Amino acid sequence: MGGSLAINQNLNRSMIRLAFIQFIRSGRYAGAGIRIGLFFLLAIGVISLFVGKQFAQQQQQGITDVVQFQQTDFPRQAALHHDDMGLLLYYLKFSVINQTRPLTALAIGQRDVNPSVQSVTIRGLEGQKYDADLTNPANLLLGNVDFSFVLVYLFPLLIIAFTYSIISDEKENGTWSIVAVQSRHLLGFIGQLFLLRLAVVMAVMLLIVALAIPVLGIPLDGVLGLFLGTSVGYILFWFSVCFWVASLQRASSTNAILLLGIWLVLLIVLPAGVNNYITARYPVPEAQATTLAQRKGYHEKWDTDKTATLEKFYAHYPQFRQVPVVDMPTDWRWYYAMQQLGDDESAGQAGELRQKLEQRERASRSIAQFMPTLHTQLQLGELARSGLGNQLRFMDYTSQFHEKMRLYSYPKIFTNAPVLAEKWTDFKVDTFTDEAPIHPLSVLGTFVLFIALFAGLGWFRFRQTIYHL
Amino acid sequence: MLQAIELTKQYVPGQPPSLDALNLTVQPGEIYCLLGQNGAGKTTTINLFLGFLPPTSGQALINGLNVAEYPQETKKFLAYLPETVMLYPNLTGLENLDFFAQLAGFRHTPDELHSLLSRAGLQTEAHGKRVGTYSKGMRQKVGIAIALAKQAKALLLDEPTSGLDPKASNEFSEILTGLAQSGTAILMATHDIFRAREVGTRIGIMRAGHLVESLSASDLTANELEAIYLQTV
Amino acid sequence: MALRIERLIARQVWATAFKNRAFFGVLMGIGFLLVYAAVTGWVSFRQQNAMGRQYQQQARQEWLNNPDKHPHRMAHYGHFAFRPKAPLSVFDFGMESFLGNTVFLEAHKQNSVNFSEAGFSTGLLRFGEISLSMVLQLLLPLLLFFVGFGTVASDRETGTLKLLLSQGVSWQQLLVGKSLGLIAVMLILYGPVMLATGLLWFGLLWFGLQGGAVNADQTLRLLLLLGSYFLYLSLFCVIAVLVSARCRTAKTALVSLIGLWLMLTLVLPRASQALGSYLYPAPSKAKFLADIQADVLKEGDSHNPNDPHYKELKDSLLTAYGVDSVQKLPFNYSGFVMAEGEKISAQLYNDHFQRLLAIYDQQNRFSKTLAFVNPYLAIRNLSMALSGTDFASYVDFQQQAEQYRYDMAQKLNELQIELISNQKPGPTDKPHQIGKNHWQEIPDFTYQSPGVASVFRHETISLLAFIFWSGLLWVVAWRLTKTLTAL
């Protein structure tokens, strides 16, 4: 009994070895061989790490630049406007940084579009909050070659290349009938063929991530675990799709066209279609409306009753009513009240804009539940803190930061506090750390569902047709 | 009509040639059958006559023209029937015939096309059906009709009867004999010793690129031929 | 008749394609996508341009409604420039979604062009957008490969090729015939797309939705698009046939063509752009602005009363007018200083901006030059340029907006110099101001789209690439006719 088990295991092991040799050599006749494909993917995977590293360095450089600017500009401005606190704070730009994690370099997401640094004066926020970053739109249009691109777009192609003719090739060469007769457990044999390829693909993915950990300095934490879980889930999803297509028992060319068609629909046609839909369904004219309202809200106060403006300001900030009015070169209290009212009067439009963006985020998330490709891209972005969710939370934080700076500055301005009494180099650049919780179930649930669906369909179909030629 | 002069084909330099200095002539009205094992050089000979391969040395002549020099002109005198005629599966037999005849520069009326198919032995009901539904024998008959439509002076056949049932094979022989009588020169590579003895005027036996025997079919019985064949190869 | 054999072969390719039921399914799918693309293109064009026009009018109205004011208040009140979509953007969205469309124009300050669609996107945008041009550039070549992979290879695999050639067909006739057949199949989709584009474009212009009219420039753009896409798609037909002719089996041909397609449309464009931005890093926004500020401070800081440049300016003015204080000058001195400051800072900003553009240009050079290796990049760049949705058109908008901003600021400075008293008003005096009738002296911002000639200037490489590709394929095909075999 024990002996026969050992023989079986030995047999199994040498079978797997032969199957592996057959798989690795099989590319010899096709134009692009298995080995070329593997090498290519590994190479582009490594390149993606360098792209990520460069991105991280640029982010770091951006932070260094802004820290340095603040360090030199604040004392210079303070010296220049040493007798006018209101004028100084008119000019000073306080910066806040959206923290870039090492993991962000693996899934750059929207971080190349949206600025990771916001610099705001204490004047009207709505006129500054949406300031665009300096970007080369050609880079944005063509997209990054980051790890998420390699995983989401290229890994499925390798999986398809590995498996599209897994059975049909043997049929076309005439070896399948022999295999079918010789094998004791044919479905198990097919399963082994798939597992073998799965192991190779997983090894490539894990190797790339393993390289990324030291190269990018990624901490080994739960977030990385979920990131890996998403990647594994995505790869399993594509294997289950290929398994199902193989079970349809079509010719190699038909399989290739079918699988590439699925790839095309899941990665190009449907996501683009959903994007067109969301853009048209939730247009954001509120953005322009907000800026126009902010300009009007502020500027028209120059020509309206001063006391009315101040009353409105006190209604917002009753604590400043008590601050006694002091003589100063410019009536800064009135000036900043006007600025404040620009924000207050455009708050409605700004709120609507915020809501629209949240609707967009929610809509794409719910649609993504039914499209593993979208789901993967959005989840990787969420885990790497590079999606719209992160951007919205960063904007919220910027608003809080702006409010904090206002509340700090207003009393000093209204009393025309001596500028040089303040230590301006103590104003550090603030950093936003995104700590929004992520639920593992919402990350991995979609994969479990789709893998079960396709693997189940494939298994069911194979049971019916496995011996058909 | 068909003539090979010291015709040699060497695929890989340094290796023994696949066809070594073949000399062969097929006159109008003659049916020359090439026998030999797989890899003896039969198909290479036919491909050289078709101009699908450049010869290493020597010449393949059709109607006195060197095939290598005049690949286009020599095709005019030539019809060819491969081992398996695949044709276009989504066209009917009639459409396929029309297509290939037009390629050769012949326009036929539907009646003429039907009569060509019938002459080739394809039953009338099948003319309008898609070739995808045909058996091998039926496709082979469309192939013959294509050759007939071209009224070629020379016909090259590469194992045309392999896989055909005896009746179809017999009908095929009759058509070949008929063509030869009307003056066509026919070169046929085959494994079928019995059929070769039946239709052939002359029989060549090849081995490893050499034509080792060239016999007159009328001098032999099938059994004698088989004995010679087995001794030779 | 001419090309008799070729047309015969072409008809056979056509018939084979249309006897495949799956092909009809794909045709329907692509047809649906095209309708979807046309509708969303039309809708977003109308939405954005209507919105832009509405806000542009509103902004202008609010500007004109200002009461009597100090001109410098107006310089800070400022104006907006909303970027209108080009009529042909219904066909090719190009970079539209990654470009901002609203810029606030005020004195002293070059604001960023904000509110790009990408900034409001959930990240889905990075998967691409469905436009008519995307279907033509990306999906149609793949469809042509699917239809064309077997054109020669299947015939070879089945042995039909030998039969074809033994009938006296030459390789040249065969390749030309097969290509023509595939081109005919291509026209089935290309024709309606271009017709739809033409109609959309005509409709948009005719009904005055763009505020423009059907003119020679726009017509030339449309015709060039028509021509270049026809050439592009024909190239892919010929490529499919040539690869099919080179491959032993249909499966190999299919796998090679799919690999080629992925290389051309997915890997090469991204990789070349990534390489470009890797080799030529652009400065961060903080650095860009800090550098400009540093230069401005070096040149002369109008806000610093002790700045040497302005001190010198003041002294020379005082000497020229023979007075001892700026209050005695016959014009408004602070207006004069601001005009000088605006001149300096605008000049420096433009210098830095040009340098930034030069870096971007270097970054893009790889993917632009790669048009000689990759016809997809050639058509992509050319199509964007012709549709007015490329970076050059955007830069043109930015520059027109900046010019407007500069002119507006200087006009207001001029009004201040001429009309505002040089004496500071006392605490009880009415503040200095000028009549509101002056506000309309500054015209509204209207964007003038550049002529088609600018496309030739910016996309010379793409155009040359097309010529190169046509020539190359001709040479390759001609050489192949000599070397191909039936076996």
Image (cartoon, coloured by chain):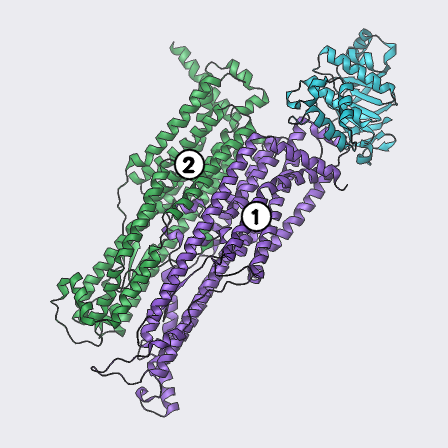
Chain colours: A green, B cyan, C purple
Q: Is residue A260 above or below residue B148?
A: below
Instruction: Name the one closer to the observer, B47 or A280.
Output: A280
Place of residue B174 in the rendered image (x, y in percent of width and height, measured from the top left): 80, 14
In the image, farthest residue toward the front: C207
Helix, strand or loop at disc 1?
helix
Query: Are the numbered discs 1 and 2 placed on the same chain, yes or no?
Result: no
Q: Are marks 1 and 2 in contact (CB under 8 Å)?
A: no
The residue at 82%/22% (across/down) is B186
Kind of residue sitting beneath label 1: Leu
Q: Which residue is mark 1?
A: C195
Instruction: Name the one closer to the observer, C318 or B121.
Output: B121
Q: Which residue is mark 2?
A: A205
The chain letter for the residue carrying disc 2 is A
Kind of residue sitting beneath label 2: Met
Viewed as shown, does residue A50 lie left or right of A337? Answer: right
Instruction: Name the one closer to the observer, C188 or C154.
Output: C188
At label 2, counting other C-alpha atoms closer than 10 Å, the crowd grade (few under 14, some 14-19, many 20 or more) is many
The chain letter for the residue carrying disc 1 is C
Q: Is residue B151 above or below residue C215?
A: above
The residue at 52%/13% (across/down) is A181
Place of residue C370 in the rendered image (x, y in percent of width and height, measured from the top left): 56, 51
At label 1, counting other C-alpha atoms closer than 10 Å, the crowd grade (few under 14, some 14-19, many 20 or more) is few
User: Does any portion of residue A230 appear in the rendered image?
Assistant: yes
Viewed as shown, does residue B84 lie left or right of C186? Answer: right
Tell me the distance, in whole angstroms, between the alpha carbons under discs 1 and 2: 46 Å
The residue at 42%/24% (across/down) is A457
Helix, strand or loop at disc 2?
helix
Place of residue A284 in the rendered image (x, y in percent of width and height, measured from the top left): 35, 53
Front label number (1 vs 2): 1
